[in-house]
Amino acid sequence: MSRTLTILTAGPGVSVQDMGRPGYLSQGLTQGGAADPVALHEGAALLGQSAMLAAIEMPGMGGTFEASADTRIALTGARMSAKIDDDPVVWNASHLLPAGARLTIGGAQTGAYGYLHVGGGFDTPVLLGARASHLSAGIGSVLEAGTSLPIGADNGGATGNVLTPVDRFGGGAVRIVPSMQTDEFTPETQNRFEATEFRRDARGNRMGVRMDQPGDGFFAADTLSIVSEVIVPGDIQITGDGAPFVLMCECQTTGGYPRIGTVIPCDLPRIAQAQAGTALRFAFVTPEEAAQITARARTEIKTLAGQVRPLVRNPRDIRDLLSYQLVGGVVSAMADPFATLTEEPTP
């Protein structure tokens, strides 16, 4: 019997996402996929499965979900309030969602994008090699109440695990490399760009995020002569009003705004997970330094499975407490605990 997860309610922009569709840039389609791919790796580590499996991405707000059969779940990314029926559950952890129970996920408390994973992943149709919804390209759609998603075969069985998330919440330093038009900005402008503390603007989505800054904007020397050319996620375009705009996973494939730099891929989740008003700073690194930083980040991702540990819970919060083996043996209140096994029982 196939398993499903039914969406009873859903926040705006909730969708199915995986690692996206690489290789279609020349056809006008960016890779897309999860805004925070690190969260997919964390969910995979918690459930002991592939990070390529599809999960539900929840920007800012979750929803209410019900499984048709007992289902393993994991919650990663932006920390949100969550409960199964009336019992609170821990974020960045794996749990059992019993058949018919309701999983309720509230608003984001830290970060912007939360993720709901299921054991076996979501077995939705594959299009151009992926299950991800690419909303700006019209591939897939947001999830609405009443939708039932098929779940793939789950080869695991463990739940009750927790993981400390990779540090990417709360803003901070974001490393960038020079881009095609960096030299069109004067050294003084580049230095001021690095010295500026930006704030994540409320205007942002899977296509891009605008940055607010105090003082004057940033302008290239010859903006009008720049022709449209290929652009990629992480590029920082400077729009007509001088404000930086960081391109995200569903950005367009060409653009004509000057780019002052490009966020290195392992730091892009820090942009994605910044809530409105969060402080961010950009710092230039060389391509050689960026390659070293990227290699270290990939190594850190590979170690996630080894960092999973048992979730220690308050017994009052364990809904299936009676199913646990809490006592390792049977004892008698009448027996002498100091009696040896060779003694004959007293008649």
Image (cartoon, helix red, strand yellow):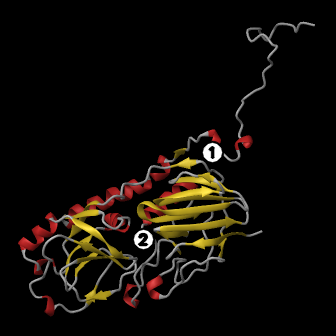
Give residue 149's position: percent from left, percent from top.
Answer: 65, 74
Q: Mark 1: which secondary structure?
A: helix
Residue name at image x 42 percent, y 85 percent: 24
Quadrant showing the N terminus = bottom right
Please name the residue that numbered disc 1 is placed on: 317
Residue in the foreground of this view, choosing between 16 and 11? 11
At x 61%, y 72%, the residue is 9
Judge from the rendering whether residue 64 lies leftward or rightward of residue 340; answer left or right: left
Image: 33 above or below 127: above
Please give left or right for residue 123 compared with residue 256 in the image.
right
Q: Which mark lies nearer to you, 2 or 1?
A: 1
Identified at 48% across, 57% down, the residue is 42
> Label 2 to label 1, Cα distance in Å?
32 Å
Q: Residue 119: tell me if it is visible.
A: no
Q: Position of residue 99 (x, y in %)?
A: 73, 61
- Give, as a three-letter code, the residue at label 1: Asp
Name the residue rendered at 46%, 74% in the picture: 33
Pointer 2 residue: 35
Please state the horizontal and vertical placement of residue 241, each as a whole percent of the image: 19, 83
- Element type at mark 2: loop
The three-letter amino acid code for the residue at tag 2 is Ala
Give the position of the C terminus as an image quadrant.
top right
Percent across and percent down for residue 88 are: 59, 52
Mark 2 / mark 1, whichever is N-terminal? 2
